[in-house]
Image (spheres, rainbow, N blue to C red):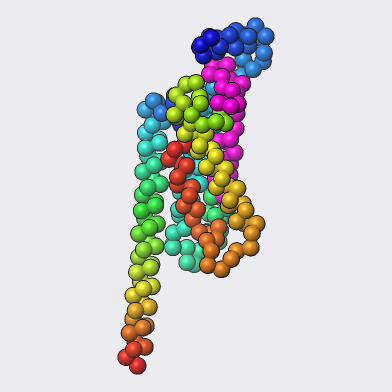
Amino acid sequence: MMGGTDTKNTWVFSMYAATFCAVFTLMIIQVALISCLKKNALRRQNVRAGDGLHQ
Amino acid sequence: MGRRDRVHRRLRHVRRSGSPLTTVPTWLITRTLGITAYLLLFFGICLGLLYGMPIWKDKQNTRLWIKNIHFLANTSGVFLAAIHPMLLVIDPYLPFRWTELIVPFTAPHEPFLYGLGTLTLYGLLFIIITTDLKKSCRPVPGELSTSQPTFSSFLPWPTA
């Protein structure tokens, strides 16, 4: 789509760079949020397992 | 006969024939379609990423609305991306043959970049078809559902 002619245009190239950065940032945020959720869930599971052992 | 001679002969033929195609700014339309398709896909990917984030606990309606727009933007982006190379066949500025468009890396001008474009279109079509197939199939427990992010779509997007 952006091949050849239009990538040499400064505006089009900067648009490509900006959109790439936006998607990359959103991806990082999503991965960070999901890993945070996973960690919390694992911690809760470990606490429950510990409680079960003590009883 | 060189490629440039063939292009010139084809151009002369188009001019002599007085075809109405010469009056249509196909090159401009092709470029506009390409950029619009790219922006729609960008918008669709952003919405897909937002939709996959665990921030919609009490806002299921908003999440559903984002999901619908995500599908709409991606499907229209792929549709425009499919029309975008087709116009090159009738374009008098830089004419292509069907085989040069379908077979990657065989374009007469900048074959690597145009080849990447062809591969991107195949990738996008693959994602659309597999997503639709997944939707029509009954979900199996433990398998990835369509509501989960289609990470394979990140591969063709940068090559676009």
Residue at left offset 40%, top offset 57%? A30
**Which percent across, then down, holds residue B45?**
48, 47
| Magenta segment | B71-100
- Is residue B115 shown above or below A55? above
- The image quadrant that residue B103 belongs to is top right
Magenta stretch encompasses residue B95: yes
- The residue lying toward the viewer, choosing from B144 and A7, is B144
Above or below residue B46? Residue B159 is above
Q: Is residue B148 left or right of residue A24?
A: right
Residue B90 rendering spot, x and y as whole percentages = 61, 21
B48 displayed left or right of A38: right
Does residue B36 show up?
Answer: no
Name the residue nearer the viewer: B94 or B29. Answer: B94
Position of the C terminus of chain A by quadrant = bottom left
Q: What residue lies at 53% left-to-right and 54% top-to-bottom?
A: B66
On whether residue B89 falls in the magenta region, the answer is yes
What residue do we see at 47% from left, 63% from top? B56
Q: Main secondary structure of the magenta part?
A: helix
Relative side of A29 to B25, left or right: left
Write the residue at 37% across / 61% down.
Answer: A33
Most distant residue in the front direction: B1
Q: Position of residue B65 (x, y in %)?
A: 56, 55
Q: Which quadrant of the figure has residue B16?
A: top right
Tell me if I can see residue B156 in this picture: yes
Q: Number of callouts in the render?
A: 0
